[in-house]
Amino acid sequence: MTVRTAVRDLAYLLGDVHGFWLSRRHWRITAQWTAALLALTLPWSTSATSIAAVSLLVAGLCAVSPRQASATFGRPVVLATLALPLVMLVATAWTIAPFEVAADQFDKYGKLVFVGLLLAVLDTERSVQRVMWALISAFSVVLLLSWLSVIWPSGPWGWMTEPGVPVKNYSVQSTGFALGAFALGHLAIESWRVGRRRAASLFLLGALACLVNVLFVAAARSTWVSLLLLAALFSFQRIGARGAVIGLLIAALLAPAMWLGSPYFRDRVSVGAEEFQAFFDSDDAQRIATETSVGIRLALWENGLEFISEAPLFGHGTGSILPLYQRAEDAGSTVVATDDPHNQFIAVAIPYGALGLAALAGLWIALAAAFFGSGLYSWLGQAFVLQQLVASMFDSVIWIFERGWLFVVLAATLIAARNLGGPGAAGPPRAANAERTR
C-alpha cells in the first residue's frame, strides 16, 4: 500500500460521480478503506470506532453482491460467527428483562456479523494489507507514547489514565503488544534465515519493545498467563512438540527473574494474590468483593454460577445479566450490579444457557480450524485464538466494546490474509501479487 495507491483510489471514486451510487466497485473501494479506518481507530476512540463501523456496514452492504454474500456467509467459520447473534435475537422471546433493555444488548454480539462482512470486502491482498498496516500503525503509536511517558514522566501526559497507558483500555494495549511480539518474533527468524540481518534486527527490537512493555510497564494479568502459553506455542510452531516443552521451561525459568527485575510485575502479582486470599479469609468481604479487581471477579463468578444453575438450558434471556446482578445486590449479596461478569463463558451462559455455550464453543472450534496448518498467517491465527481463549476466562472479550471490535477485526483480517496468501504462506503477500489481484 502506497500514497500513489491511495491517490489513485480517491481519483477513481471522485472521477465517476454519475455512477457512484450504482457501482459496486466504488462501494467496494470505500468499504476497504473504511475497514482500514476502523482498524486505525480501535485503540483510541470508541466514538470513532462506532462511526467507522456504521460506515463500513453501509458501504459493505452496497458493495457485496447477493452471490458473493451467499458464498461468504455460507462458509463454516462465518456461520459460526452468526450463531451467537442469532441466539441473542431468539432469546428475547423468554428474557426476564424489559424489551428495551434486551434491545440495548444487540450490539454486544451483533458485531460478530462484521467478520463475514469484512471477509466479503477484503478480497484482495492489497485490501488486507491496508487493514494490517492500519492496525500496526495504531499500536505502534500506542507503543511509542507508552515508552515516551515512561522515559519522560514529566512530559505532557496528564491525559493518560495511568503512566504508560495512552489508551482507555490497557487490556487492549497489552493484547496488541503481546500478539505483536509474537508476530515480530516469527518475522525476525524468517528474515534471519534468508540473510536479511538488518530487517531481522529491527523485527527483534520491535518484539522486545512490545514484550518488555507488557512485562514492565502495563498489562492485564490475563496477558501474562497468555504469554506463558504463547511462548510454548511459538516454540511448538518452530521446533515441534519438544519445542513446546522447551518454551514452557524457558518461560518458567524467566518468571523468577521477572519477579526480581520488574516492580510492576511483582506488585501486580502480589496484590492479585492478596486480593484472592482476602476474598475467602477476610472479615471485610463486602469491600473486597466490590472494590478490588480480583474480588469483584470472584463475586461476579460466584453469583453468575448460581444464575446459570437456575436456567441451565436456555438461560434467562437477552439482557438478563444486569437485572440478575441487581437482584442479588438488592438481596444483600456482596456483588457489584453490572452487565459484564468478566468471563466470556459466564456472560454467555447466564442469558443463553447451554444453547449459548454451544454457539460459543462452535465459534472457537471454527476459528481454530480456520487457522489449522503452517505459515505465518496460520501461526498468528493460532496465537490469536489461544490468546483470546485465555483472556475469555478473565474478561468478556467479545462483549466488551474495544476488545470485541479488536476480536472481530483480527479474526477477519487474519482469515482473509491466510486464504489469500495460501495455507503455507510464510510472510506478508508480495506487492507483485497484490498488483495482480487488484
Image (cartoon, grey):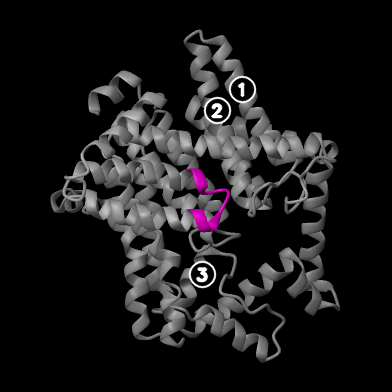
Q: Which quarter of the picture shows residue 86?
A: bottom left
One can see residue 312 in this view: no
Q: Is residue 14 left or right of residue 411?
A: left
**Given the image, on which type of amino acid does mark 2 rest?**
Leu
**Given the image, on which type of amino acid does mark 1 rest?**
Leu
Tell me the quarter of the image containing the C terminus: top left
Q: Which quarter of the picture shows residue 369?
A: top left
* Residue 47 highlighted magenta (yes or no): yes
* Residue 270 highlighted magenta (yes or no): no
Numbered badge on residue 184: 2
Tell me the quarter of the image containing the N terminus: top left
Residue 49 horizontal/vertical position (percent) = 48, 54
One can see residue 306 in this view: yes
CB atoms at circles 2 and 1 under 8 Å apart? yes
First in sequence: mark 2 vs mark 3: 2
Kindly identify which residue carries mark 3: 347
User: Closer to the camera, 253 or 13?
Assistant: 13
First in sequence: mark 1 vs mark 3: 1
Q: Mark 2, residues whose alpha carbon is within 10 Å: few (<14), some, or many (≥20)? A: many
Residue 112 horizontal/vertical position (percent) = 38, 58
Please tell me whether residue 34 is drawn above or below residue 280 in the rendered image.
Answer: above
**Given the image, on which type of amino acid does mark 3 rest?**
Ala
The range drawn in magenta is 40-48
Q: Secondary structure at mark 2?
A: helix
Q: Is residue 24 left or right of residue 191?
A: left
Q: Secondary structure at mark 1?
A: helix
Q: Mark 3, residues whose alpha carbon is within 10 Å: few (<14), some, or many (≥20)? A: many
Kindly identify which residue carries mark 1: 204
Question: Marks 2 and 3, how far apart in space?
Answer: 33 Å
Q: Is residue 390 left or right of residue 287?
A: left
- Between circles 1 and 3, the one closer to the viewer is 1
